[in-house]
Image (cartoon, helix red, strand yellow):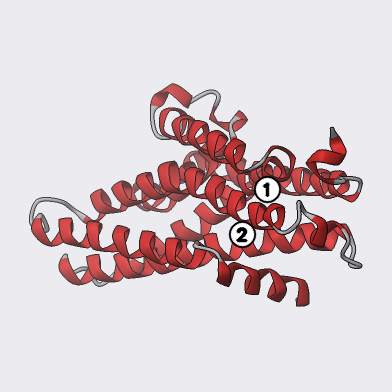
Amino acid sequence: MRIFVAEWMKTRHTILHRLVLLILLFCSLAVLGYAAYRKNSFSLAFFYQGFFLIWSAVLLPLGVGILTGILVHEEEEAGNFYGLLQCSRKRSSLYLGKFSAALVFLTGSTFLTTLIISTGLCFLLQKERGVGLFLTAACLAVCGVLPVLAVHLWISFAFGMGASVGVGICGLLLAVLLGSTSLGDHIWYAVPWTYPVKMAMFPMAFSMFPENMRTEAEKPFVLAFALSLVLSVLILAGSMLWFEKWEGRGGNR
């Protein structure tokens, strides 16, 4: 807990808080503004699909790349990782602290944005139910992004912020092409960047399936959920072991 608090305090001197708040407000105002203008033309399912497609397939892959890049870059700026590498605490705990800080940013921004948008949509469209469906999808999107977060944190330490953002852009393209279209029907499970959008779309799709088809509809969700958890543990454990022997980018060269 102390390591996490220390990591959180470090972020006060970065642009992360302002960046997250700006993205949250922009997405909320954009979606609700459009919904207020076209509320008689589209259903709640339309706005659900549109929001989670943008958030899970575009903003999350790119955001993870930027977020982990900034968190690691601040350590690089502070004496080329000297403070981090010379810390008396276990390397694995420090690495896990970075991961936890990034996860809190992602989870907080996802849930706050989803709560604002879903509440506003239900009010505008006069729907009594819907907030729970949106929040369930937000939870699943966060679960789906865990292996991506683990990958990007390692990339940020090993290769730097530029590499992390670059991979995030590639991940964005993969998520859009393979996660939200029929192009990835048979290969999406091999691309972790597709997991958030696949999992976020499940609650609404499941609610629209007739009961006799729900068992078949559950299969891709169970696969994505299992792959996300297993890959998260494997990648995080492997990168923590790697970090135990890491001596900075200069040391590795």
Q: Which residue is more in the foreground, 192 or 12?
A: 12
Q: Secondary structure at mark 1?
A: helix
Write down the residue under mark 1. Answer: 153
Instruction: Determine if residue 210 is in view.
Output: no
Q: Position of residue 59 (x, y in %)?
A: 43, 47
Type of amino acid under label 1: Leu
Which residue is located at x 37 percent, y 69 percent?
115
Classed neighbour count for the residue bearing mark 1: other residues with Cα under 10 Å, few (<14), some (14–19), many (≥20):
many
Q: Is residue 98 rendered to the left or right of residue 193?
A: right
Q: Position of residue 114 (x, y in %)?
A: 38, 63
Type of amino acid under label 2: Ala
Which residue is located at x 46 percent, y 36 percent?
172
Classed neighbour count for the residue bearing mark 2: other residues with Cα under 10 Å, few (<14), some (14–19), many (≥20):
many
Cβ–Cβ under 8 Å for marks 1 and 2: yes
Separation of disc 1 and disc 2 at Cα? 9 Å
Write down the residue under mark 2. Answer: 102
Above or below, comparing residue 154 to residue 43 in the picture = above
Q: Secondary structure at mark 2?
A: helix
Q: Is residue 249 rendered to the left or right of residue 166?
A: right
